[in-house]
Image (cartoon, helix red, strand yellow):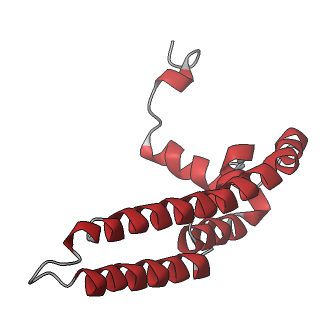
Amino acid sequence: MKNRFAGHYRPTDEEFKKLWSECLFLPDANILLHLFRYGAKTRAQVLETLEQLKPRVWIPYRVGFEFHRRWRDVDQNNRDAYEKLKKEIESYGRKMGGLFDEYTRHQTIDAKSEQKAIDEFIKEFLRRLSTSQ
């Protein structure tokens, strides 16, 4: 029974060892497309791993086809996400600054100074976000 349904049984340590030393690695299109979604460190680790496994990595035609069909969309979605995030941050920054509008004549709250600090924070935050694209 075990021979007939081997996929339902956990391989032994020896079988695992043989499997890892001899198997082929076939990433699907999503694994390759995730390279556009990962941060630089994770992307480098995945590429380094694939490079080390290079003799045993095989990309089927269909995987390559799907990757090439979709990579531009995935890349554009990542770029669009930065733009959307920047717009939302700017919007929330204006809202935060607007909270001080009713306190412009308050005796202890320096509303203009606080609004300026928020503006400076938002500008610096957006600058950092732009450099991480």
Q: Nearer the viewer, residue 75 or 6?
A: 75
Q: Where is residue 96? Give x, y as percent.
A: 32, 66
Q: Where is residue 6? Give x, y as percent.
A: 55, 23
Identified at 59% across, 47% down, the residue is 19
Q: Nearer the viewer, residue 76 or 65?
A: 76
Above/below status of 97 relative to 59? below
Q: Nearer the viewer, residue 5 or 50?
A: 50
Quadrant of the image occupied by residue 56 = bottom right
Q: Quadrant of the C terminus?
A: bottom right
Above/below status of 63 relative to 45? above
Side of 27 relative to 7 (left or right): right
Identified at 34% across, 66% down, the residue is 98
Above/below status of 39 relative to 81? below
Residue 70 visible: yes
Q: Most extreme residue toward the left, as rendered?
A: 108
Quadrant of the image occupied by residue 113 = bottom left
Above/below status of 52 relative to 120? above
Identified at 74% across, 58% down, the residue is 75
Residue 36 visible: no
Q: Where is residue 9? Give x, y as percent.
A: 46, 26
Q: Nearer the viewer, residue 133 or 64?
A: 133
Number of on-image labels: 0
Q: Where is residue 85? Give x, y as percent.
A: 53, 61
Identified at 72% across, 52% down, the residue is 74
